[in-house]
Amino acid sequence: MKVVTGSEMLEIEQRAAAGGTSMAELAERAGNALADIVLEHWPDRGWLVLAGPGNNGGDGEIAAAILRSRGLDGTVYSFRREDARAGVQRSEDDSDLTALRALLSRGPAVLDCLLGTGASRAPEGRLAEIIDEVNSADAPVLAADIPTGVNPDTGAVPTVALQADRTVAFGFAKVGDVVYPGAQYAGLLSVAPLGIDPQSAAGVNLEVTNQSEVAAMLPRRNLNSNKGTYGRTLVVGGSRDFPSAPGLSSIAALRAGSGLAHAAVLEISQRVIAAHALEPIYTVLPEDDGRISARASPSIQAVLPSCDAVVFGPGMGSGEGILQLTRDILKMLRTSESPPAVVDADGLNALSRLPEWWKDAPALVATPHPGEMARLTGLPISEIQSDRVGIARRYAARWQSIVVLKGAGTVIAHPDGRARINPTGGPNLATGGTGDVLSGTIGGLIAQRLSLWDASVAGTYLHGMAGDMLAQELGDAGTLAGDLLRQIPRARSALSRGELLK
């Protein structure tokens, strides 16, 4: 699904107009799309159109006329709409919002047509008061294109936003409809094409990952194959405090289809992991105060050439020895015989302490959560979260690496500007260790010869889908990272069979 900004949508509409489809025709189709959803989902409630000053308000007035023509009663409540038609309740004549509260008390289907994708200012004053009244009412809300108060280009909510039950995006989904926190305000999202040629968005490089795309990325298993066919994933990490983290990554790599998992870890990690899993093979590394010693570099360098992917960082801890080890690893990864790398967790924290680390690094996959991204970039978490797609793209280009910015609606960004928003996964994944499972899943797919991009897109989707399958069984709380491991091959199998997750 293509996802556009407000300015990109304006250009698409202008091209449609140049091709013979007028703005008036697009508005008529948008109004019909709104009316159809009301008739399908709330035919017995009546309706209340909140019509703002721009084209979004015009779409709402068209929807109101259509609903009236089909026998449904309702009211248009306008906000700063100078050309409001007769019979419209003007907010300017409703100083204490008594009329709005009375209309809402009837429980109508509310059509949010206040602000569209051209809005440049966050709601305040009277508009914010209107939003608060609607949010506190017992009435379903349908947002036209994007909920009022959500930034259409970033998904940020600077002040307040209208909480919709459904949103219908016109032409294409908008960034704010699918990127959190905006996506939470959008509710169930649908797209009304309005007759716009899908090829008009061919140059748009932001999409929501879809199931068929991921299924096509996953490597097929050959009957005439062996463990070497599917690659060896090396996991470097662990410490006295976090001995099992590299075990989660190692088993995830195997569950994602890697033929072998090789854990380069401390002796304590080896004992902990081996107590729970029989499959990994080990290189035991020297220890320095409960962490991997910088003296471990030769041991790691000895095994790197035999591996097809490396995951560096899970549970590794911090300190000067880890910093030196990270410098050494970056040098090793620059050599032609070294495999591609996924850097996660404490590997990322070490990179954040190395000035301009990317100048000494090959292309890799970085998998930060917002806190780690803040350390890597020097930006506040609030700034990162207010423009997740933009920040991920900016630093993917700067670092010349794939960035997997974790969180609700994980963003995967390529140095060339491509980006994907991952739709799978939910709050049950908000628990320790699930990031280790994700890095291992991506590493395991790289070991099977997927590109860094395909492995990141597919691995993130697969990881989230495994979480969704668990949520169906266990609910939104109580999932353990280890629970995900058995679901990964089940999710992969469902994808290969084309089964949709309910």
Image: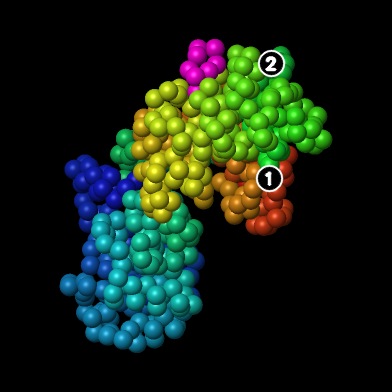
Say whether residue 175 is visible: no
| Residue under the image location 30 percent in, 70 percent down | 124
Residue 337 painted magenta:
yes
Which mark is first along the chain, 2 or 1? 2
Place residue 315 in its image quadrant. Answer: top right
Near mark 2 (Cα within 10 A), the count class, few <14, some 14-19 or many ≥20, is few
Residue at the disc numbered 2: 228
> Amino acid type of disc 1?
Ala
> On the picture, is 432 further left or further right than 392?
right
> Label 1, on which residue?
481
> In the picture shown, does residue 489 fall above or below 167?
above
Alpha carbon distance from label 1 to label 2: 27 Å
Can residue 380 be seen by looking at this rendering?
yes
The correct choice, above or below, for 51 with respect to 413 in the image is below
Residue at disc 1, secondary structure:
helix
What amino acid does circle 2 point to?
Gly
Residues tagged 1 and 2 counted as in contact (Cβ below 8 A): no
Element type at marker 2?
Answer: helix
Q: Is residue 454 above or below residue 48?
A: above
Q: Nearer the viewer, residue 68 or 89?
A: 89
Residue 384 placement (x, y as % from top left): 40, 48
Q: Position of residue 197 (x, y in %)?
A: 32, 41
User: Which region shows up in magenta?
Assistant: 330-338
| Residue sitting at x 63%, y 50% | 431
Left or right for 247, reference 162: right
Location of the N terminus (image quadrant)? top left
Residue at 60% from the left image edge and 38% from the top image edge: 317
Residue 368 place in picture, x, y as percent: 50, 41
Q: Position of residue 333 (x, y in %)?
A: 51, 20
Please identify, in this view, whether the residue under mark 1 or under mark 2 is nearer the observer: 1
